[in-house]
Amino acid sequence: MKVILYGAGGRMGKEVISLIEAGEDCTLCAAVDKISESVELHELADYKGEGDVIIDFSHHSLTKEVVAYALSRSLPLVMCTTGHTEEEKALIIEASRSVPVFYSANMSLGIATLCDFARRAALLFPDADIEIVEAHHNRKLDAPGGTALMIADTVKEVRPEAQYVFGRHGMAKRAPEEIGIHSLRCGNEPGMHEVIISTDYQCLSLKHNAESRAVFAEGALSAAKFISRRCAGLYNMYSLIEG
């Protein structure tokens, strides 16, 4: 599989490159980045190599041109960036009508499993209070992160009345329908997510720790292999798990 990697100069882009170089079933045919000295996306129009899939680990503000290039070459696209605006999400969804698009706020299979467990727990304990705590490194821009919102959205599937509360302060009683979401930003933390499901008599804690950023690069490559064999449509980590 030949990969066009967008955002190659960033931390996650470098992780993807390391895994590609260490493996035997993938090759990097183009490294694209707006900041580093690697090839610019608009210059790929003259690129002579043929890629099989695009992996995007750049920034959500570049969604329009990444999607445009994928459509111009009819290439499958793995979107790994977070923080998309509603307009950018609409572009991604529209593109999936023409090419396969894999879109997930988190590329870890472990997080996909955590979401599944959280949904089941919310269903089994309908009166429980649910709080989500996430921690990332001190350079992360968006808070809460896309993964925390993805977990909350998964819970909301079985609790449609849920209302998100971001952090807590002041004098106010917790409403039963609330899902609290709390963000920590410290040091070089790759990513920690914990879902707390608590009743008056017991408390269940579901927690996932990313020990290395390589876990997200690994997931992105797995998604790329998966989507390269699919027809146009919108796919996510559950699609990968279900095969």
Image (tube, rainbow, N blue to C red):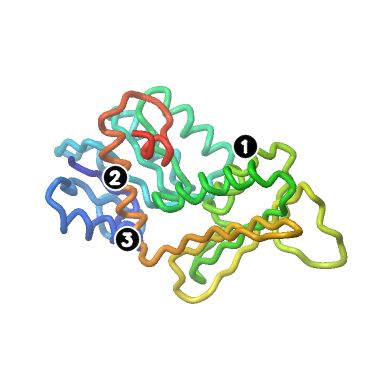
Tell me the CA gap for discs 2 and 1: 26 Å
Name the residue carrying label 1.
Answer: 157
- Of the residues under marks 1 and 3, which one precedes in the sequence? 1
Image location of residue 170, percent across then percent down: 84, 67
Quarter of the image that includes the N terminus: top left
Q: How many other residues sit within 10 Å of disc 2, few (<14), some (14-19) or many (≥20)?
A: some
Tell me the CA gap for discs 2 and 3: 12 Å
Secondary structure, mark 3, is helix
Tell me the CA gap for discs 1 and 3: 30 Å
Q: How many other residues sit within 10 Å of disc 3, few (<14), some (14-19) or many (≥20)?
A: some
Name the residue carrying label 3.
Answer: 214
Which of the two marks, 1 or 3, is nearer to us in this view?
1
Residue 143, quarter of picture? bottom right
- Give the number of the disc on residue 182: none
Which of the two marks, 2 or 1, is nearer to us in this view?
1
Image location of residue 215, percent across then percent down: 34, 58
Secondary structure, mark 1, is loop
- Give the number of the disc on residue 222: 2
**Residue lying at 28% horizontally and 48% vertically, measured from the top left:** 5
| Residue contact between numbered discs 2 and 3, judged by CB atoms under 8 Å | no
